[in-house]
Amino acid sequence: MKTNNQPTIEYIFVYGTLMRGMENPVKETLKRHLAYKGAGIIRADLFDLGEYPGAIKNEKGNQLYGEVYQLDIKSDVLRVLDEYEGYCDHDVNNAEFVRAAVEVAFLGKSKVWAWIYWLNPTFGHFGIKILNKSYRSHLKTKIA
């Protein structure tokens, strides 16, 4: 999938309920159409929105750890993910999350461009800021 002035994007970076081992209603679709490529890092502010997290891009923010998957670009997996995340490209202002491209660093230092679902800053709520570097780590402290 090609975006304006960006390379073809064949990857997605996930940082919340779409990560391996998390419960979500699209888990089976993801297993069929995404291939895990490794852990990745971006710079962002992470927020606890109750049942799921949201991240807002911040080049000076914390390192945020997540997972990188290669998309089966011949499938409709992006449409499924857009629906799950509540993203609609014709009505971005009313979407809780917006899909955009982000450069992700793998732990081995190579980088890829990947899709990410950012929390839409115009949507209105940010929840509680998470200081952990990953949502998974945050959940462990939240439960304890």
Image (spheres, rainbow, N blue to C red):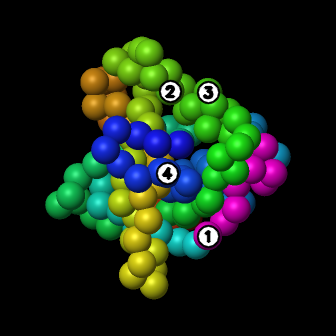
Q: Residue furthest left?
A: 60
Q: Which residue is mark 2?
A: 87
Q: Amino acid at mark 2?
A: Tyr
Tag 3 and tag 2, C-beta contact below 8 Å: yes
Of pointers 2 and 4, the one earlier in the residue sequence: 4
Q: Residue at x 39, y 81 (%)?
A: 109
Q: CA distance from mark 3 to mark 1?
A: 23 Å
Residue 46 position, x and y percent, is 36, 51
Q: Secondary structure at mark 3?
A: helix
Query: Of the residues under marks 3 and 4, which one precedes in the sequence?
Result: 4
Closest to the camera, between mark 2 and mark 4, is: 4
Q: Residues within 10 Å of mark 1 (few under 14, many from 20)?
A: few
Magenta-colored stretch includes residue 36: yes
Residue at horizontal 53%, vertical 72%? 39
Start-end of magenta stretch: 29-37
Q: Position of residue 31 (x, y in %)?
A: 78, 54
Residue 37 is marked as: 1
Residue under label 4: 9
Between circles 4 and 1, the one closer to the viewer is 4
Q: Which residue is mark 3?
A: 83
Image height of 89 relative to 15, above or below: above
